[in-house]
Amino acid sequence: MDITSLYTAVSDMTNLRKSVIVDMIMVQLIALTLGCFLILVFSGPKMSSTDLSWIIGALFVCFSATGIVYRRLGQQG
């Protein structure tokens, strides 16, 4: 393995298109939103009011961030 092939490999990994990075962020936000919703649905009745407040706040933040990213994607296209 020579230095040229190593440089090419590192260059290919770091020169991602912007849409790939935005897609990865969008997948993470959707997963966080879905995770918060599932925690709320399945563990909500057993949680304290403080824990419920945190989960509902996190769900609101994740849902809002997903909407913001989705709106930006719609404006670019």
Image: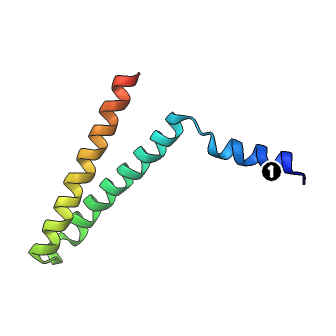
Q: Residue furthest top?
A: 77
> Which residue is tagged 1?
6
Give the x, y percent position of residue 4. 85, 45
Task: Using residue 19 as the reference point, say whether residue 40 is left or right of it.
Answer: left
The residue sitting at 12% across, 78% down in the picture is: 48
Quarter containing the N terminus: bottom right
Dot 1: element: helix
Give the x, y percent position of residue 60. 19, 53
The residue sitting at 48% across, 46% down in the picture is: 24
Which amino acid lies under the numbered mark 1 shown in the image of this protein? Answer: Leu
Quarter containing the C terminus: top left
The residue sitting at 38% across, 30% down in the picture is: 73
Task: Using residue 74 as the reference point, say whether residue 3 is left or right of it.
Answer: right
Q: Quadrant of residue 38?
A: bottom left
The residue sitting at 27% across, 39% down in the picture is: 67
Q: Is residue 17 above or below residue 74?
A: below
Please state which of residues 74 and 41 is positioned toward the viewer in this rendering: 74
User: Quick one: label 1, few (<14), some, or many (20+) residues within 10 Å?
Assistant: few
Task: Using residue 22 as the reference point, say whether residue 11 is left or right of it.
Answer: right
